[in-house]
Image (cartoon, rainbow, N blue to C red):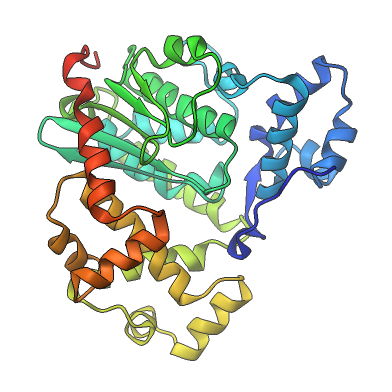
Amino acid sequence: MKPAATKHPSTRHWTASNRLLWPVLEVLRAHGHTPAQILKRADIDERLAESPDGRVPLHGLFAAWRLAIELTQDESLGVKLAAIANPSATYSWPMPLSLLEHIGVLSRNLAEAIETQSRYARLLRDGAQASVHLDGETACFRLELLPDEPPALIELMFAVMLNLARRVMRRDVTPTEVWFSHRAPRNIDLHTALFQAPIRYEAPFNALFGPARVFLEPLPTANEVFRTRVLSQADKLLLDLPNVAQFEDTVCAQIETELPNGNTNSASVAERLGVSGRTLHRRLHERGTTYQELLDRVRLRLASRLLAAGRPIADVASSVGFSQASTFHRAFKSWTGQTPTEYQQRCLNGTHASNGSSEAE
């Protein structure tokens, strides 16, 4: 029986670097399973899986990870495989992790590094967006992933990003708290050892918390000249990728720009992008999505961020383009199953658990 694949229509053409697949295949090979069998069950072309610069369907990557957990009965697999980004390794990391490392090392600080690396996240995989939000003395690093993401893969992504920060900062950076939206595995000893911080499961979203000063601390390796050259190389690599997500990302970015002004209609966004409304809808339809889906995606992302920061609900409603708080209330509950008040209370009740923890040093 084939594991469930990604169901959202707009993700059907999304891909990921096969570097996220190789460690899983090695684990399964060690358990007596041949890669060909696993790839067939996950609906992944063997040539794409083995190619030096290959990319595999994202739904296939998810299926392979689910198979790995099912066949090994190891819920800690994501944390164990974080060794692919060992911060103390003396050898160069595999691409595209090495490129993301260089972007980070050459940035002014960790906050800028993460913001820039997020622009190039597609080199590693589609369907992931990283961001840092500073609120007084606290920083929140969020990694927004897909709803049907395998929990072990979520943990791997966070472990890789944390190890990347440790590599960039050249010291043992530790968060003050870690949030995962999925349920806790049976044993979290390895998770606690890796993250070195309290972990909250079934949280409102996936995030790492830490002192803002760590994210703003100047990096001694910063070099704008070299950084510009590396970004130019990264831009060229992005152009070589399938462009299925780029147009959606552009539309989402423009929607986010328009929302504070109360502009939510597609005609305004299309005009800003230099295309007709008809062309905008056609191109989104070709990608299996709609303007309304992207609008809701952006609204949910921004609303979640603002609510978690403690903003008044009426202000949040206005900031994401709703003229009435009651309409926002109904929409948010349809997206999350919670009212804005319930969501905000869950966030605020858990966010400051880090106050009693040691700071990231």
Front-most of 210 and 343?
343
Q: Residue at x 40, y 37 (%)?
A: 206
Front-most of 233 and 357?
357
Residue 108 visible here: no
Answer with the quarter of the image where residue 51 lies: top right
Which quarter of the rendered picture does the C terminus lie within?
top left
Answer with the quarter of the image where residue 166 lies: top left
Front-most of 344 and 238?
344
Which quarter of the rendered picture does the N terminus lie within?
top right
From the viewer's perspective, is residue 32 above or below residue 164?
above
Count of all numbered marks drawn on residues in the image? 0
Q: Is residue 303 left or right of residue 54?
A: left
* Spot occupied by residue 119 in the image (x, y as percentages of width and height): 41, 49
Q: Residue at x 33, y 80 (%)?
A: 272
Q: Is residue 28 left or right of residue 7?
A: right
Q: Residue at x 37, y 21 (%)?
A: 199
From the viewer's perspective, is residue 3 above or below residue 288?
above
Q: Residue at x 14, y 39 (%)?
A: 135
Answer with the quarter of the image where residue 33 lies: top right
* Spot occupied by residue 95 in the image (x, y as percentages of width and height): 58, 33
From the viewer's perspective, is residue 346 above or below residue 277?
above
* Spot occupied by residue 221 in the image (x, y as percentages of width and height): 29, 24
Q: Is residue 146 left or right of residue 118?
A: right
Residue 56 visible here: yes
* Spot occupied by residue 301 in the image (x, y as percentages of width and height): 34, 55
